[in-house]
Amino acid sequence: MTTWVKCTPWTHVVTNGHCANLSAVLSCVRRQFFVLRSKAWHAALFCTRTQVLLPEQIAVFRGRAKKNSIEERNTFLKRKKAPKIVFLYYPWGVPESSLKPASLFSTLWAGIMKTMPPYNETQPVFFLHIPRTGGTTLDAIFFQNIEPQKVIRVYSKSEYERHTLHSIDELAQIRFITGHLFLDSYDPPAIYKTRVNAFTFLRDPVERLVSEYIFYKTWPNQHLYSVLNERKISFAEYLTSREPIFIYRGKNFMTRALSGKSFKAESYPYAALAMAKRVLEKNFFSFGLLERFDESLLLLNRTVHLNSILYLKRNKLMANRKETISDDDRALAAELNRADASLYAFAEELFESRVRDAGCDFPMQVAAFREKNSLYRKVARQLGAEATQLSDGIQLSKDSIWWSYTAVRKKLTFFASKRPNRTA
């Protein structure tokens, strides 16, 4: 028996009979079908509870809203030798009339399938870098894959103003924009009057603030370093201060960054929180969690297709530096960032659903990646990469001398060739 599944262009089904975006389809059919393996997104293997479906058993039928006769479908099935699953593809979207139950269809869900937010390959990728969420590590991953002339870094007011002078033609050559800056528009995402594919990373709000405060007191090149140390500002003062340089840092900053809305620091931002959740789910093509960095990175790369995502942790605080924050101060941070806590809880649930949609072999992919990255880090340590420190307590800071990535790759390739492939 053939199972028919309705699809739209937003599920990225291609006409060669394979599925190019498994996560979108699996969000609807995961109870009946599971991904067994996927290579380069063009050799999908599906399996039911009882059998494996090979790519040649998967077909795509280009549906037509007014002329989808049973005769046309039967002819299609005979020509394809009765595939096990057919994606009924509507190029302009599934018409409402076709959603009514029909005897030929064995629909696997009610209504139009849930899809991932859109991604346009002609637009640059924009990383909304919220401080202390693994962004420096993520920047390094993108920098090793994209030519420097196609990257815009915005970590100061002067950098932002300099890039506003770019012409439309110059901006058209940019592939990656990153920085501690908000978007000009969130729906749709745009900056410098240019539409972008936006994503971000989040972190537990209290842990993020603790890390931010200690990092700013530790890194001499941060503009708050002298203020925090000369005035001996405590963590509690950092959170509650009404000075312009501090007032918004310790109070629901992630909600502010993801909504783009301005609100009073002391109030609970109901509208901004709702906006931030909507942006995260509907407008950003991806997002990640620092606490699940490897999984986040693999999900992100399913869309952006970077050549290499092996990495070293950068701008990393030593663990013993976090013990200076008391439980009372952490409780104060939690109270002042209740909206961020709600946003983070929402993000955790949404992230978990996307991990489930990634297929039953996704945990194996994560384990294989961690093994490769562990080997990569060992080779990097041999070259002295992780020994580079700008100041006591920070490893591989932004200002550290960059090590030879090519040398690490060559050694890694050599060692990997000597080991059996466990993921084959």
Image: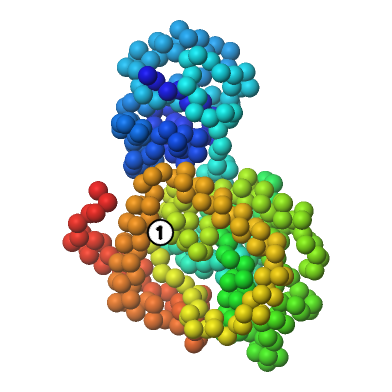
Crowding near the residue tagged with mark 1, few <14, some 14–19, many ≥20 C-alpha atoms within 10 Å? some
Taking the spot 79% from the left edge, 77% from the top edge, the residue there is: 242
Residue 121 position in % (x across, y down) = 52, 44
User: Does residue 257 appear in this view?
Assistant: no
Taking the spot 69% from the left edge, 50% from the top edge, the residue there is: 186
Q: Is residue 6 above or below residue 128?
A: above
- Tell me which corner region of the image, top left, top right, bottom left or bottom right, holds residue 155: bottom right
Whether residue 27 sits left or right of residue 126 in the image: it is left
Q: In this view, does 370 lie above or below 233?
A: above
- Could you tell me which secondary element the residue under label 1 belongs to? loop
Which one is nearer the viewer's eye here, 200 or 49? 49
Which one is nearer the viewer's eye here, 334 or 143? 334
Taking the spot 55% from the left edge, 38% from the top edge, the residue there is: 115
Name the quarter where the N terminus is drawn.
Answer: top left
Q: Say which residue label 1 marks.
A: 309
Residue 413 position in % (x across, y down) = 26, 61
User: Does residue 423 appear in this view?
Assistant: yes
Whether residue 193 sits left or right of residue 123 in the image: it is right
Which one is nearer the viewer's eye here, 198 or 287? 287
